[in-house]
C-alpha cells in the first residue's frame, strides 16, 4: 500500500532557494509538525487542512507583514509556487 | 407594523436612514438606499424571468456586494436563495442543482450597484411580501444519505435572533465581518444580523478571515461584533491575540470551547463578552447561547452551552420524551421561530427529525437535534456529546455516513468505515477512512479512492488519511473494533 505521504517522502528533498522560501518552509514544517518542508513538497501530501493553511498564513503575516490568503496555499500547494505567490503580494 | 421579512426590514432601514452604510468591501461602501434600490432593479429582472414565491434560486457568485444585492432581490420576489460554493466539485454542485430542479445558477446583470440603483423608477415595484414563515434561504449541509441535504429556513428563523432585545452587537453603529463560507448558516448570521437591524456587514477579501485582516477591519470599517468558529478563535488567540483589540463582542461556536484559550483571552480582555453558541442549521444559526465567565473555564464538564437564544424554545427530553430533571442526560429538542420548514425534497427525513411533542399538554413541532446535554440547577445546559455519529471539525458538520456512501461507490471498494482522529487537545481534528477492497479484479489503491472522493465531495469531507485493510477487526461481541483500527493507522501515520 502506498500513501501520498510515502510518495512524497520518496521524492528527493529540495531545499528552499530564497530567504522568503526558507521562512515559508520553516513555518510550513512547524505547522504541519514535520522536520522539514522542501520547495517541491506539497502541502496536501503532509495532510494539510484548510485550518492549517490559515495558521500558516497568520504566521507569515506576523513575520513578514505581508497580507497572505489561505486560498493561495490551497491553490498553490507546492512550496515554490506558494512562495512565488506570496512574493507577488504587497508588503502590508 | 414593523416589517417581518428580511427584505422588508432592509427597505425600512433604507427609508429611515438611506445614507447609512449597509455593506463595506475594501474601498467600496454601499448605502442602504443604494443596496435596496439596486436589489429592486434586480428583482425586476427576476420578475420578468418568472421568479416568484416558492422558487429556490441557486447562486454561484463570489463574495461581493453584488452577491448580497442579488440575494436581496431574490427575497424581494418572495423566493429563497441558496449559495453554491465555487470550491465544491462540479458533481456536488450538480446534485444540488438537481435537487432544486434548476438548470444552472442564476445570472444577473453584473453592473456596479450604484448604476443598477440609478435605473430604478418605482421603489418596490416588483416586491412581494411572502410573510415571515416563507422560505428565505436553503443551507446545504452534510446528509446521512443521498449527499448534500438542503435545510429550508424561513425569514423569521433568520431575523429572530436580532429583534429588539435580542443578540447584542447588531444595528446602527455595529459592524461584522462577512467571512463565513457562503452556503453556511453563519453567513446568514453575519449578513442578515446586521442588515436586518440597520448595521454594517463587512465583506472580507478571499474566503478566510485572518488576524491581520480583523485588525484592519476594526480600524477601517468599525468592526466590533465578530463570529468565529471555536477552532478559529483558538487559532487567533494562539497566533495574534492583540487582533481582538477594539472588538466589543465575540460569538464562537461549532465545537467544544477550549477552556485554556478562553482563560487566556478573558485575562487579556476582561470586559469583552464571549458568547458560546450552539445551533444546527435546522434551528437557524444559534439555538442556545452562554456568556462565558472566567469561572466556567474550571468546570469539569466543560464550558456551558447556556440557555435558549432569542425567539428559540429549548427542551431537554429523555428517551420517553418527558422533560429531564437537573442532572439527567437528555436530548436537546428545539422549537420556536428558528425552526426550518424542513429538508428540501425529503419528506421522510423531515418527519423523522421534526416531530410533534406534547409540551405542557399542547403538541408542538420540535426538531430532534441529536445533541445530548444535561441541565444544572440554574437551568443552564451543558453539552454531553452526540447521540449519533455526526461530527464537527472546524465547525463544519460532517456525517460519516455520507463519506462512507461515497467511498462504497468507488469500484473495487467492498466496505469501509470513517474514523474520527482525536488530536492532543482531545478534539476531533481529522478523519481517517479504512476500506476493504474486493477480492480479485481491480483493487483500488488509496490514491484512487482519494481521487474519486475529491471528485464528489467537498474538501472538508475527504478524509486526510485513507488506508486499505485486509479485514475489519471485530470485538468479542461481534462489532467492528474501531479502537483497533485506529491504533493501526494512527501508529503508521506518525512521523
Image: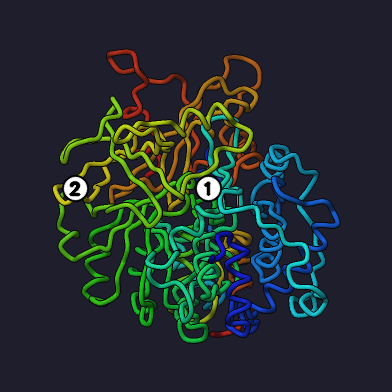
Q: Position of residue B460 (x, y in %)?
A: 53, 47
Q: Chain of mark 2?
A: B
Mark 2 or 1: in front is 2
- Where on the picture, by quarter, is residue B291? bottom left
Identified at 56% across, 19% down, the residue is: B414
- Residue B39, compared with residue B141, is above or below; it is below
SS assignment at label 2: loop
Mark 2 Cα-neighbour bin, 10 Å: few <14, some 14–19, many ≥20: few
Q: Which residue is mark 2?
A: B301
Count of numbered labels shown in the rendering: 2
Left or right, B331 with respect to B97, comes to left
**Which residue in the structure is indicated by mark 1?**
B460
At x 59%, y 63%, the residue is A71
Query: Is B136 drawn above or below residue B1 in the view shown?
Result: above
Which residue occupies 49% across, 54% down? A48
Q: Which mark is residue B435?
A: none
- What x and y, as percent, mark residue B293? 20, 65
Place of residue B471 in the rendered image (x, y in percent of width and height, measured from the top left) = 44, 19
Rendered-image quadrant of the N terminus of chain B: bottom right
Give the left or right position of residue B18, taking residue B214 as reference: right
Identify which residue, B102 or B425, lies in the foreground.
B102
Residue contact at pointers 2 and 1, CB within 8 angstroms: no
> Circle 1 marks a residue in which chain?
B
Residue B143 drawn at (x, y percent)? 53, 36
Q: Earlier in the sequence, mark 2 or mark 1?
A: 2
Q: Nearer the viewer, residue B196 or B495?
A: B196
Q: Residue furthest right?
A: B48
Question: Are discs 2 and 1 located on one and the same chain?
Answer: yes
Q: Quadrant of residue B481?
A: top left
Amino acid at each position: 500500500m502506498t500513501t501520498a505521504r510515502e510518495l512524497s517522502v520518496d521524492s528527493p528533498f529540495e531545499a528552499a532557494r530564497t530567504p522568503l522560501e526558507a521562512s515559508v518552509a520553516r513555518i510550513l514544517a512547524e505547522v504541519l509538525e514535520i522536520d522539514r518542508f522542501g520547495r517541491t513538497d506539497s502541502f496536501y501530501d503532509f495532510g494539510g487542512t484548510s485550518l492549517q493553511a490559515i495558521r500558516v498564513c497568520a504566521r507569515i503575516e506576523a513575520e513578514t507583514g505581508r497580507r497572505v490568503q489561505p486560498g493561495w496555499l490551497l491553490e498553490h500547494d507546492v512550496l515554490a509556487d506558494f512562495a512565488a505567490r506570496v512574493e507577488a503580494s504587497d508588503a502590508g | 407594523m414593523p416589517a417581518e421579512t428580511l427584505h422588508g426590514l432592509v427597505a425600512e432601514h433604507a427609508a429611515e436612514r438611506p445614507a447609512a452604510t449597509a455593506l463595506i468591501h475594501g474601498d467600496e461602501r454601499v448605502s442602504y438606499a443604494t443596496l435596496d434600490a439596486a436589489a429592486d432593479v434586480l428583482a425586476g429582472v427576476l420578475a420578468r424571468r418568472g421568479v416568484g414565491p416558492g422558487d429556490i434560486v441557486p447562486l454561484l457568485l463570489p463574495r461581493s456586494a453584488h452577491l448580497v444585492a442579488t440575494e436581496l432581490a431574490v427575497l424581494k420576489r418572495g423566493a429563497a436563495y441558496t449559495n453554491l460554493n465555487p470550491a465544491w466539485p462540479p458533481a456536488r454542485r450538480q446534485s444540488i442543482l438537481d435537487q432544486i430542479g434548476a438548470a444552472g445558477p442564476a445570472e444577473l446583470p453584473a453592473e456596479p450597484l450604484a448604476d443598477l440603483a440609478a435605473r430604478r423608477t418605482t421603489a418596490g415595484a416588483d416586491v412581494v411580501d411572502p410573510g415571515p414563515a416563507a422560505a428565505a434561504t436553503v443551507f446545504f449541509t452534510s446528509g446521512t444519505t443521498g449527499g448534500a441535504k438542503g435545510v429550508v429556513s424561513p425569514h423569521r428563523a433568520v431575523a429572530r435572533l436580532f429583534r429588539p432585545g435580542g443578540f447584542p452587537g447588531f444595528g446602527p453603529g455595529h459592524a461584522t465581518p462577512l467571512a463565513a463560507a457562503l452556503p453556511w448558516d453563519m453567513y446568514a448570521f453575519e449578513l442578515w444580523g446586521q442588515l436586518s437591524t440597520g448595521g454594517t456587514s463587512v465583506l472580507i477579501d478571499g474566503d478566510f478571515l485572518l488576524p491581520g485582516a480583523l485588525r484592519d477591519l476594526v480600524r477601517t470599517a468599525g468592526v466590533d461584533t465578530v463570529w468565529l468558529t471555536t477552532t478559529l478563535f483558538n487559532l487567533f488567540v494562539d497566533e495574534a491575540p492583540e487582533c481582538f483589540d477594539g472588538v466589543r463582542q465575540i460569538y464562537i461556536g461549532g465545537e467544544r470551547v477550549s477552556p485554556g484559550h478562553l482563560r487566556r483571552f478573558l485575562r487579556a480582555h476582561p470586559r469583552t463578552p464571549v458568547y458560546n453558541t450552539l445551533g444546527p442549521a435546522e434551528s437557524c444559526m444559534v439555538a442556545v447561547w452562554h456568556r462565558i465567565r472566567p469561572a466556567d473555564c474550571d468546570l469539569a464538564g466543560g464550558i456551558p452551552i447556556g440557555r435558549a437564544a432569542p425567539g428559540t424554545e429549548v427542551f431537554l427530553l429523555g428517551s420517553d420524551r418527558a422533560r429531564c430533571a437537573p442532572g439527567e442526560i437528555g436530548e436537546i429538542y428545539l422549537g420556536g421561530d428558528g425552526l426550518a420548514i424542513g429538508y428540501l425534497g425529503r419528506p421522510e427525513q423531515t418527519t423523522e427529525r421534526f416531530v410533534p411533542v406534547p409540551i405542557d399538554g399542547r403538541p408542538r413541532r420540535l426538531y430532534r437535534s441529536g445533541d445530548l446535554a444535561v441541565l444544572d440547577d440554574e437551568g443552564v445546559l451543558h453539552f454531553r456529546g452526540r447521540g449519533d455519529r455526526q461530527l464537527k471539525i472546524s465547525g463544519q458538520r460532517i456525517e460519516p455516513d455520507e463519506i462512507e456512501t461515497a467511498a462504497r461507490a468507488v469500484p473495487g471498494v467492498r466496505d469501509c468505515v470513517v474514523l474520527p482522529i482525536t488530536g492532543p487537545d482531545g478534539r476531533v481534528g481529522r478523519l481517517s477512512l479504512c476500506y476493504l477492497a474486493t477480492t480479485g479484479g481491480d483493487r483500488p489503491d488509496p490514491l484512487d479512492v482519494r481521487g474519486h472522493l475529491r471528485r464528489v465531495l467537498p474538501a472538508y469531507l475527504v478524509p486526510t488519511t485513507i488506508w486499505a485493510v485486509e479485514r475489519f477487526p471485530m470485538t468479542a461481541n461481534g462489532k467492528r473494533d474501531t479502537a483497533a483500527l485506529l491504533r493501526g493507522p494512527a501508529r503508521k501515520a506518525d512521523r
